[in-house]
Image (spheres, helix red, strand yellow):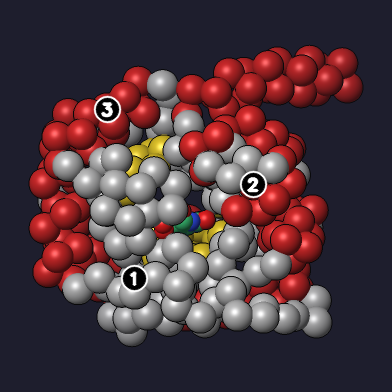
């Protein structure tokens, strides 16, 4: 899954794709590099960030989604927790709703996904972006995240969402310390046990900067490739990244090795 932030203030690419034409061009480029999904967002959710108004968010994302749905071979997802924005995005051609609040943000989201037969990504976040990094604490982070996602998936099922439409995501960096993030990645197999596809989104995030000494998010590409490759080996099915080409190349080598192993095992 390639990421496009049609925002002036995202942590990862700071307004690079705020311009509609540049965002569309980037979506096409990411698909060319091998992305199967393109995630389009119109509100930054970086720590401490204030919410964006729905009308503004729609103005940012709808033209980009319309163009990509028409001209891009990848499936488009909308990164929003507002049902109003999600509904308009589905109308414009998106097929998946990426809800970082896992249905907590807008009670109408599950019914919308069910009615429209859309894919639904449920992500764990502690609190909201404004406050999530203020002293995050868990007794057992992996178990708590898994139980929360199981419960939210249950709500989606109750609303009529098909089980095969649901994806779960531990929400790396959303109300987590470095150690919480690392534990969640180690314990991806626990999350996979829920039986839904697992999404890992660690691309260019702060903990990679902490581990590599890279202050500038755009300099965190190699650390990102490393963590997503490991994530795939630990059971992640969807890797949400800003840099598709480097990860595709790493996965090509990884897959050749793993398939060879599978072949030998047979
Ligand atoms: N991370 C971000 C945004 N949306 N959605 C899912 N499902 N999983 C994630 O890990 C995730 C997400 C944050 O990254 P980015 O979109 O680059 O930044 P910003 O929120 O500043 O636009």
Q: Please, what secondary structure does the residue beneath circle 2 have?
A: helix
Using the numbered discs, state the Cα–Cα distance from disc 2 to disc 3 in whole angstroms: 28 Å
Q: Is residue 143 above or below residue 121?
A: below
The furthest residue to the right: 265
Tell whether 162 sits left or right of 208: left
Disc 3 crowd rating (10 Å Cα; few below 14, some 14-19, many 20+) is some
Q: Quadrant of residue 69?
A: top left
Query: Which residue corresponds to mark 2?
Result: 209
Q: Is mark 1 within 8 Å of ligand 1?
A: no
Using the numbered discs, state the Cα–Cα distance from disc 1 to disc 3 in whole angstroms: 25 Å
Disc number for residue 28: 3
Query: Quadrant where the C terminus lies?
Result: top right
Residues at badges 2 and 3 in contact (C-beta under 8 Å)?
no
Where is residue 90? Give x, y as percent: 20, 56
Ligand 1 shown in quarter: bottom left
Where is residue 202? Give x, y as percent: 59, 49
Question: Mark 1 vs mark 3: which is more N-terminal?
Answer: 3
Question: Mark 1 vs mark 2: which is more N-terminal?
Answer: 1
Using the numbered discs, state the Cα–Cα distance from disc 1 to disc 2 in whole angstroms: 27 Å
Query: Quadrant where the N terminus lies?
Result: top left
Query: Which residue corresponds to mark 1?
Result: 81
Q: In the image shown, does 10 or 251 lie closer to the viewer?
A: 10
Where is residue 262? Give x, y as percent: 80, 23
Q: Quadrant of residue 13?
A: top left
Residues at badges 1 and 2 in contact (C-beta under 8 Å)?
no
């Amino acid at each position: 899954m390639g990421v496009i932030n049609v925002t002036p203030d995202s942590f990862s690419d700071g307004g690079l794709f705020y311009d509609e034409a540049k965002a569309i061009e980037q979506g096409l480029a990411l698909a060319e590099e091998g992305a199967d999904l393109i995630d389009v967002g119109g509100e930054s959710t970086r720590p401490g960030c204030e919410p964006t108004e729905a009308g503004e968010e729609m103005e940012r994302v709808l033209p980009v989604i319309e163009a990509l749905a028409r001209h891009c071979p990848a499936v488009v997802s909308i990164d929003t927790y507002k049902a109003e924005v999600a509904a308009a995005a589905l109308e414009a051609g998106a097929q998946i709703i990426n809800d970082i609040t896992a249905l907590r943000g807008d009670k109408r989201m599950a019914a919308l996904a069910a009615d429209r037969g859309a894919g639904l990504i449920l992500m764990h976040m502690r609190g909201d972006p404004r406050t999530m990094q203020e002293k995050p604490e868990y007794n057992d982070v992996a178990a708590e995240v898994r139980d929360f996602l199981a419960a939210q998936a249950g709500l989606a099922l109750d609303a009529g969402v098909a089980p095969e439409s649901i994806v779960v995501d531990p929400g790396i960096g959303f109300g987590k310390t470095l150690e919480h993030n690392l534990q969640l990645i180690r314990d991806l197999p626990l999350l996979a046990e829920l039986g839904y596809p697992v999404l890992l989104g660690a691309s260019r995030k702060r903990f990679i900067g902490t581990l590599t000494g890279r202050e500038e998010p755009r300099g965190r590409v190699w650390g990102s490739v490393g963590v997503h490759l490991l994530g795939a080996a630990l059971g992640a099915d969807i890797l949400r990244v800003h840099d598709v080409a480097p990860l595709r190349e790493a996965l090509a080598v990884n897959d050749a090795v793993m398939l060879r192993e599978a072949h030998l095992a047979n």
